[in-house]
Amino acid sequence: MEILSVRHAWPEDSNFTINRPNGRNYYIFLHFWNSVKIRIDGKYITTEPNTCIIWDKFYPQWFQSEVSLIHNWIHFDGIDVLEFFELCNIKPNHLYTVKEPTLITELVRKMEKEYTSNMHLGSIYCDVLLRELFINLSRFAHTGNQVEYKNQKVLDEFSKMRLIVFSSLDKDWTVKKMADLVNLSESRFYSIYKSIYGLSPIKDLIKARIELAQQYLLDDNHTIE
């Protein structure tokens, strides 16, 4: 995919209106920070804040913001755009509301930097970032807007705890014993662990033990016993 133009956190005055009856001959991604009024298939809809839309080529475009508008936008094209949308299960001319808008804005910021600075392999990196954006949009739409855990202090504590556990897989680890290492209740520990690593503490422990066993089976220095 090729980026034709991109801006993050772009401001417009109140009552800003876009009206393009014939659309454009390229795709447009928009992420509105505030609520706007938008027309889709002839119907006027008032969006929630942090709503995104991908306008298809030549699709009639109209939206209006009664208040001062802040939005991210990308103009892009490519022969495999629709194929990638199908893979991601996202649709043009459809509204997507996200609960982690900073992730979208940060990806668009990176794209803008790469696009405007002529950096080495910048066009390839822009393609990667654009695909990452659409993958995250798909995840927001189809997995209940699961938010990635970002508290760095907690991430560091869990990383140290996990290193202790994985360095002594032969010990009788329980959720409580692991939770005690980071001074959390079992329920809170379980929730944060799954948010960070994508699976439960016990499943992660079993997976690590299986992987270690596989290494031992391939190692001539260890017997089956």
Image: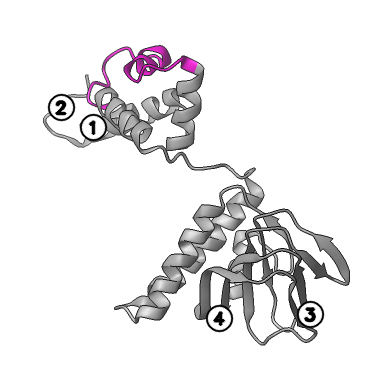
Q: Are marks 1 and 3 in contact (CB under 8 Å)?
A: no
Residue nearest the viewer, comparing 213 with 74: 74
The nearer-to-camera label among 3 and 2 is 3
Residue 14 lies, in percent from the top left, at 71, 69
Separation of residues labelled 3 and 2 (CA atoms): 68 Å
Is any part of residue 78 visible from this angle? yes
Which label sits on residue 78?
Answer: 4
- Residue at (63% x, 83% y) in the render: 26
Q: Are marks 4 and 2 in contact (CB under 8 Å)?
A: no
Query: What segment is highlighted magenta in the picture?
Result: 166-186
Badge 1 marks a residue whose secondary structure is: helix
Q: Residue furthest right?
A: 42
Q: Are marks 4 and 3 in contact (CB under 8 Å)?
A: no
Pointer 3 or 2: first along the chain? 3
- Residue at (63% x, 51% y) in the render: 98
Q: Are marks 1 and 2 in contact (CB under 8 Å)?
A: yes
Q: Amino acid at mark 2?
A: His
Which label sits on residue 60?
Answer: 3
Q: Is residue 55 magenta?
A: no
Q: Amino acid at mark 3?
A: Pro
The nearer-to-camera label among 4 and 2 is 4
Separation of residues labelled 4 and 2 (CA atoms): 53 Å
Badge 3 crowding class, 10 Å Cα cut-off, few under 14, some 14 to 19, many 20 or more, is: some
Badge 2 crowding class, 10 Å Cα cut-off, few under 14, some 14 to 19, many 20 or more, is: few
Q: Which residue is mark 1?
A: 217
